[in-house]
Image: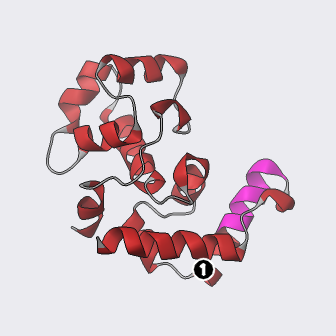
């Protein structure tokens, strides 16, 4: 599967604390399991490795671990990072490969609706050119 291929070579590793939606307790549990960066998380969750064993070690549901892994995978796109990976996931994009296939003129309106609905501020929404940059970088990432 193409999305797994992009997970095998993380190009950007962000501190795990920057991944959206993690509580301080979850961050500490990840750290206790040797997961300090998004690259560490991808390494522990890539391929056919069972998420269940790591989820048990972390004391969290496997579905949470899967979501964090998806966010870390999206964060590999440099201009997306941990800032926009959650927004992309909520817009229905779950991998760099899927982002690389997206059209900026279709994705941007979805992001705009989500961003305005969530933050009530249109001015903070990424521009079409930023979304285009995400897509271009995702294409480079998945072609490696």
Q: Position of residue 98 (x, y in %)?
A: 41, 70
Q: Residue at x 24, y 37 (%)?
A: 44
- Chief secondary structure of the magenta portion: helix
Residue annotated with mark 1? 104
Disc 1, SS: helix
Q: Left or right of 97: which side holds 125?
A: right
The quadrant of the image that shows the C terminus is: bottom left
The quadrant of the image that shows the N terminus is: bottom left
Q: Left or right of 133: which side holds 61?
A: left
Q: Residue at x 56, y 50 (%)?
A: 86
Q: Is residue 116 magenta?
A: yes
Q: Residue at x 33, y 52 (%)?
A: 10
- Residue density around tag 1, few if under 14, some if 14–19, many if 20 or more, within 10 Å: many
Q: Residue at x 23, y 63 (%)?
A: 5
Residue range of the region highlighted in magenta in the rendering: 111-120
Q: Is residue 25 above or below residue 8?
A: above
Q: Is residue 19 above or below residue 120?
A: above
Snapshot quadrant of residue 35: top left
Q: Is residue 133 above or below residue 125?
A: below
Snapshot quadrant of residue 57: top left
């Amino acid at each position: 599967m193409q999305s797994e291929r992009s997970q095998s070579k993380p190009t950007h590793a962000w501190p795990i604390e920057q991944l959206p939606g993690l509580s301080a307790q979850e961050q500490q549990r990840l750290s206790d399991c040797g997961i300090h960066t998004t690259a560490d998380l991808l390494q522990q969750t890539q391929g056919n490795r069972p998420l269940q064993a790591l989820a048990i070690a972390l004391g969290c549901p496997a579905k949470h671990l899967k979501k964090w892994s998806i966010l870390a995978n999206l964060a590999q796109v440099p201009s997306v990072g941990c800032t926009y990976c959650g927004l992309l996931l909520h817009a229905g994009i779950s991998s760099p490969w899927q982002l690389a296939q997206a059209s900026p003129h279709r994705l941007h309106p979805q992001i705009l609706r989500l961003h305005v609905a969530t933050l009530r501020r249109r001015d903070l929404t990424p521009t079409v050119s930023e979304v285009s940059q995400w897509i271009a970088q995702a294409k480079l990432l998945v072609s490696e």
